[in-house]
């Protein structure tokens, strides 16, 4: 309980109206979900946590070409709603170029936990994997991990990325600047921008310290330089 309280207490001042819900338009949660099985794909690293990354995928780009894929039906088919920025994961960080992962746990998300988070993380498989790979290195219970994730996500304000996509000569710096200007307390240095190999916006990677305050990203998380050309797919 004390560990949970230490994690959540710094977040309480971040709670704001759920602006993040605007990123999940008409999200319709299925009445029943199953809990996918997860197998580790790397070594266990129970390292000390020094900060966090909230990785936010731009769903229109992720879904391009996946609209008919069965595994991405909830997120990409349009039958369960449409999505903007969604949570890829909340990742604990450690010193150097390593990070905690695959910490020992016998717990897994319940179907109720998966349903509660599907409009934020629109994939049951991803929810199960993020808990097993990252969340178990932060908290003892999946519910706590996803509560923290939702608090961070819902505290964010979302500028008009559709309008930004029309900007001539768009750069990664423009993406950072727009997000930081919309979110009090955020500097451009704390906003990582990941572009794919073709220059399309793939993710924002928001960098936090141990108390969940914005912190300048290291080079690995900062991603594309400010002058790098960028494009934003609108799902058209």
Image (cartoon, rainbow, N blue to C red):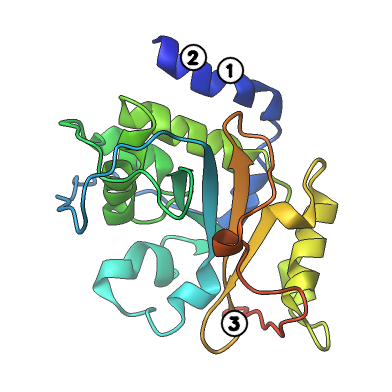
Depth check: give the residue in front, 82 or 198: 198
Residue at point 33%, 68% (across, down) = 73
Pinpoint residue 196: horizontal percent, then vertical percent.
52, 80
Pinpoint residue 201: horizontal percent, then vertical percent.
60, 75
Q: Secondary structure at mark 1?
A: helix
Bin the neighbour count of mark 1 within 10 Å (Cα to Cα): few under 14, some 14-19, many 20 and up.
few
Residue at point 47%, 31% (across, down) = 147
**Is residue 60 depicted above or below 212 in this figure?**
below
Q: Secondary structure at mark 3?
A: loop
Q: CA distance from mark 1 to mark 2?
A: 6 Å
Q: CA distance from mark 2 to mark 3?
A: 39 Å
Bin the neighbour count of mark 3 within 10 Å (Cα to Cα): few under 14, some 14-19, many 20 and up.
some
Please give the residue where the numbered disc 3 appears in the rendered image: 200
Disc marking residue 9: 1
Q: Residue furthest top?
A: 2
Q: CA distance from mark 1 to mark 3?
A: 37 Å
Q: Confirm or deny contact between disc 2 and disc 3 (CB under 8 A).
A: no
Residue at point 32%, 54% (across, down) = 126
Say whether residue 158 is visible.
no
**Is residue 150 depicted above or below 229 in this figure?**
above
Q: Say left or right for 125 vs 121.
A: left
Picture quadrant of residue 23:
bottom right
Q: Secondary structure at mark 2?
A: helix
Disc marking residue 5: 2
């Amino acid at each position: 309980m004390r560990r949970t309280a230490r994690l959540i207490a710094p977040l309480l001042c971040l709670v704001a109206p759920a602006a993040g819900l605007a990123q999940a338009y008409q999200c319709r949660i299925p009445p029943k979900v199953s809990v996918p099985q997860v197998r580790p794909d790397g070594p266990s690293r129970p390292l000390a946590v020094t900060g966090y990354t909230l990785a936010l995928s731009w769903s229109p780009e992720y879904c391009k070409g996946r609209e008919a894929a069965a595994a991405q039906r909830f997120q990409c088919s349009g039958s369960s709603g449409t999505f903007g920025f969604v949570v890829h994961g909340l990742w604990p960080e450690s010193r150097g170029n390593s990070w905690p992962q695959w910490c020992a746990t016998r717990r897994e998300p319940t179907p109720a936990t998966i349903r509660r988070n599907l409009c934020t993380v629109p994939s049951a498989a991803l929810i199960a994997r993020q808990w097993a790979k990252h969340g178990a290195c932060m908290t003892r219970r999946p519910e706590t991990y996803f509560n923290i994730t939702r608090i961070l996500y819902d505290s964010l304000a979302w500028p008009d990325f559709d309008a930004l996509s029309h900007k001539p000569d768009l750069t990664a710096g423009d993406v950072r600047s727009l997000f930081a200007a919309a979110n009090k307390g955020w500097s451009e240095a704390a906003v990582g921008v990941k572009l794919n190999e073709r220059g399309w916006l793939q993710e924002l990677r928001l960098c936090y310290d141990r108390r969940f305050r914005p912190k300048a990203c290291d080079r690995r998380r900062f991603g594309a330089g400010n002058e790098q050309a960028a494009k934003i797919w609108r799902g058209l």
